[in-house]
Amino acid sequence: MSFLRSLFAGVSGLRSHQVMMDVLGNNISNVNTIGFKSGRVTFGELFAQTLRSATQPTLGANGGTNPMQVGLGTSVNSLDTMFSQGGIENTGQRTDLAIQGPGFFAVKKNGQTLYTRVGTFQFDANGTLVNPGNGAILQGKLADVQGNIPSGTALEDLTIPLDRKSSPNATTNVRFGGNLDAAPANANINIKGKFDPNEPVGTTVNVDATVVDAFGQSHTVTVQFSKTSATTWDMAPLSATNATISGGTATLTFDPVNGNLTGVNPLVPLTLTSTLTPPAPAMVIDPTFVGLAQTAGSTTLASNFTAAKDPVSSSVTVFDSLGNQHTMTVTFIKDPLVPNLWSWSVSVPPPATITGGAGGTVTFASDGTLAGLTYNGGASAIGINPGNGATAMSINLDLGTPGNTAGLTQTKGTSSVVPREQDGYGTGELSEIFIDATGLVTGSFTNGKKLDLAQIMMAEFNNPAGLTRVGDNLYDVTGNSGIAALVSPGGTSKSLIVQGALEQSNVDLSEEFTRMILAQRGFQANARVITTSDEFLTEVVNLKR
C-alpha cells in the first residue's frame, strides 16, 4: 500500500535525525574537552522506487517521457570529524603543548602507536613525558650526549632523566676589556728640609730614600748634594742597593734673601734598574723638592718615596677539564721608559702552576687602540698545569682586535681591566626544560649552558578525517587516512608547537544550537509524516464500516 512508503520514509527520517542529535549531543558534551574535534552528520537519499521508466522520443511520433520515481526516505550518508583549528589557551605549565596547524602528537599506549591533539604532558617517575590521564607516552627523537638529534624518522619514548648533567669544558680563551691609563707612570722622591747657607762651597750632603719597585722589592737610593756657590747646589745619585741608577741630576738655585728654592735646572729623572731575580721593570723616578729651602741653621734633609701607579690587575675564573675552578690573575705594568708599552704577567694559586706564556708585552697605537700582544719565550698561549689530574690547559689571552676600540685601550683616565668572556664551564645540573615552536626540547643547566635533549615529531596525514577514534581523544590510522608522515614542526611540517598552552575544543556552541533546532524540526516533521500516514491508514480501515 502506498501509505506504507510514506510511513517508512518518516521512520527513516526519525532515525537519521536521531543520529544527528547524537552527534550534536556529543559535540556539546565535549565543548570543554582539550583537543576535541567536533563531528558532523550528512544525510543521503535512500533508493527511489521507480513507478515508470523514462522513454526516448520516437522520430515523427511521440516525444520522450521522464521516469516516475518515489523516494523511500533518508539515511546517514557520513559521520565526519571536523579537524579545524581550536583556540589556543595559555596555561603557564611548561610541559603543556598545543599544536598550531594540522599535525598530531605521536604517542604510544600499550605498545601501540596512536595519535592525538591533546598536549597535557607531564614527566612521570622515570622522566618520561606522558599524558597523565591515560599514560600515553609522547614519541620523538632523543639527542646524544653532545646534543645532536639523529636523522631519520625512527621514534622512541621521550625520556629525559632529570639528573642529566652537562659535562665540563676546559677554558681555552679569555677575553678582557677596559682601559689602561695613558698618564705617565713615574714614581717620585720628594726631598725636603734645609741647607745651611754658611756651608762652604764643596760641602756634600747625602740623603737616603727607600724605593719599592713594581715587584715589591725594596732598594735604598742615596742622592748626594754638592754646594757649588752661595746660592746653588748640584744633585746627583750616589748609589742604590740591589739596583743600578742613572740620571737624577739637577742644579738647585735658592734666593739669597729669603732662601726659597727658585729654580731646578736642568732636571733629569732618575732611572733605577733592579738587579734582583726576577728583575722588576725599570723605574723612572722624578725628584721633587716641596718644602726644601736654604735658611740659617744646621743642614737637615729628609725624603719620602711615592710609588708610581699601582699595577693594574684583573682576575677571572677559568675551568679545567674536570670542571674545577682556578682563579687566573693578569697584571699589567706600564713601562716607564717606552711610551705605549705595558708588560703583563699571569698567576694562578696552587696547586696549579704556569708552564708557559707567563707574561709578555702589550703595545698600543698613538690613538689608544690595541697594537699588539706578545708572549715571553716565544709562547703563543698561557700554559697551565691544573695540578689535580686534569688535562694541561692552553688559554689564549684575547685583548681585542688591533686598531679597534672594542677590547682593551690605553687612554687618559682611570685604569679598569675586566674579564668580558671565558669559554669554559664546570659540570652543570639540569635546571629547566624549554620546548620551542619546532618541537626542539632544550635543557638549561646550572653552569649556564644549554643543550638540545630531544625533538618532538609531528604526524601528518593526507586525510585526517579518515582516522578512527579509539577513545581518550586518541586516533588510529585506517586504510583511508593514509600512513603517518613524521616531520619536524616548523620545517617540512605545516605545524608549530606552542609551549605552555593547550588547544581547546573546536565546538562552536552557536552553530551546535542552530543545528539542534534544525534536528528538532526535522524530527518533528518526520513524526508528523508518520502520524498523518497513520490517519490515512485508519481511514482506509474504516472504509469497511
Image (cartoon, rainbow, N blue to C red):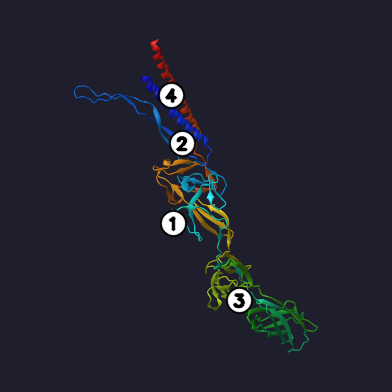
Q: Label 3: which residue?
A: 335
Q: Position of residue 271 (x, y in %)?
A: 64, 81
Q: Nearer the viewer, mark 3 or mark 4?
A: 4
Q: Residue furthest left?
A: 60
Q: Quadrant of residue 173?
A: bottom right
**Label 4's element?**
helix
**Label 3's element?**
loop
Instruction: Name the amino acid, label 4.
Output: Asn
**Label 2's element?**
strand
Instruction: Name the amino acid, label 1.
Output: Ser
Q: Is residue 83 left or right of residue 56?
A: right
Q: Label 1: which residue?
A: 151
For the residues marked 4 and 2, what is the alpha-carbon distance in whole angstroms?
A: 23 Å
For the residues marked 2 and 1, what is the alpha-carbon distance in whole angstroms?
A: 37 Å
Please state which of residues 236 and 148 is positioned toward the viewer in this rendering. 148
Mark 3 or 2 closer to N-term?
2
Q: Position of residue 419 (x, y in %)?
A: 59, 66
Q: Residue at x 49, y 44 (%)?
A: 117
Mark 3 or 4 closer to N-term?
3
Mark 4 or 2 closer to N-term?
2
Which quarter of the rendering shows the N terminus?
top left
What is the number of the mark on residue 39?
A: 2
Q: Position of residue 5 (x, y in %)?
A: 37, 22
Instruction: Name the amino acid, label 2.
Output: Gly
